[in-house]
Image (cartoon, rainbow, N blue to C red):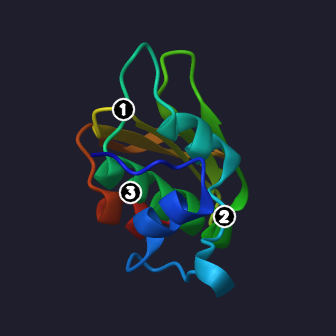
C-alpha cells in the first residue's frame, strides 16, 4: 500500500531514514512543491514510494548544490530538473513516474553536450552537482 503524501505522517513515512529529519510531533519537512505534484501521479498512474524518495533526494541535492534550480512537473507527468552548476555546466534531467532517470550535461558557454546519461542512477546524477 502506497503512503499518502498529502499528510505530514505520510511524508514522514517516506522521508524517515533517507537523509531528512522528521520534525517535532512526527511532521516531516515539506516535499518540494513539484515533488509533491509528481507524487500525485498522472493519467491514473502514480510513482512508487521508492521513486518519490529518489525524487525528494535529487530535489534536496539540487536545492543545496546548484544555482537557481528549476524543478517542475512536465505535461507528461515526469519530474524535470533544469540546473545550473557553479562550474558553468547545465544539467537537464527527467525522472518519469516509472523511475527511469534520463540526464544530459552541457557546457553553458560552448553549448556543447558534455555527457549523456540515458539510464542514469540517482547517485550518478547527484555526483554531477
- Choose the circle earlier in sequence order: 3 or 1: 3
Residue 68 is situated, as x and y percent measured from the top left of the image, at 76, 55
Task: Determine whether 8 is above or below 73 in the image.
Answer: below
Real-space Cα separation, disc 1 to disc 2, in angstroms: 21 Å
Tell me the quarter of the picture where residue 116 sits.
top left
Q: Which residue lies under the disc numbered 1?
A: 97
126 on left or right of 101: right
Q: Could you say which disc has been placed on residue 63 in the image? A: 2
Q: Position of residue 76 (x, y in %)?
A: 48, 16
Q: Which of marks 1 and 2 is nearer the N terminus?
A: 2
Give x and y (percent) for residue 45: 36, 22
**Crowding at mark 1 (Cα within 10 Å: few <14, some 14-19, many 20+):** many
Q: Which of these two is toward me, 126 or 96?
A: 96
| SS at circle 3 | helix
Residue that carries the numbered disc 3 in the rendered image: 54
**Mark 3 and 1 residues: CB-CB less than 8 Å, in contact?**
no
Q: What element carries label 2?
A: helix
Q: Does dot 1 land on a helix, a strand or a loop?
A: loop
> Distance of mark 2 from mark 3, alpha carbons?
14 Å
Q: Earlier in the sequence, mark 2 or mark 3?
A: 3
User: Is 58 above or below relative to 127?
Assistant: above
**Alpha carbon of mark 3 to alpha carbon of mark 1: how far?**
11 Å
Could you say which is closer to the camera, residue 46 or residue 72? Answer: 46
Name the one closer to the observer, 57 or 84: 57
Q: Is residue 126 visible?
A: yes
Q: Nearer the viewer, mark 2 or mark 3?
A: 3
Residue 111 appears in the picture as rendered: no
Residue in view at x 43 percent, y 66 percent: 13
Task: Locate residue 98: give its quadrant.
Answer: top left
Callout 3 environment at 10 Å: few (<14), some (14 to 19), or many (20+)?
some
Amino acid at each position: 500500500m502506497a503512503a499518502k503524501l498529502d499528510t505530514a505522517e505520510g511524508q514522514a513515512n517516506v522521508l524517515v531514514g533517507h537523509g531528512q529529519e522528521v520534525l517535532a510531533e512526527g511532521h516531516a519537512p515539506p516535499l518540494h512543491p513539484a515533488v509533491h505534484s509528481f507524487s500525485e501521479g498522472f493519467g491514473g498512474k502514480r510513482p512508487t514510494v521508492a521513486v518519490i524518495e529518489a525524487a525528494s533526494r535529487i530535489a534536496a541535492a539540487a536545492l543545496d548544490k546548484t544555482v537557481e534550480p528549476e524543478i517542475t512537473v512536465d505535461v507528461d507527468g515526469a519530474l524535470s530538473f533544469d540546473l545550473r552548476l557553479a562550474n558553468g555546466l547545465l544539467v537537464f534531467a527527467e525522472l518519469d513516474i516509472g523511475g527511469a532517470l534520463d540526464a544530459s550535461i552541457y557546457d553553458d558557454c560552448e553549448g556543447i553536450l558534455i555527457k549523456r546519461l540515458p539510464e542514469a542512477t540517482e547517485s550518478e546524477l547527484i555526483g554531477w552537482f
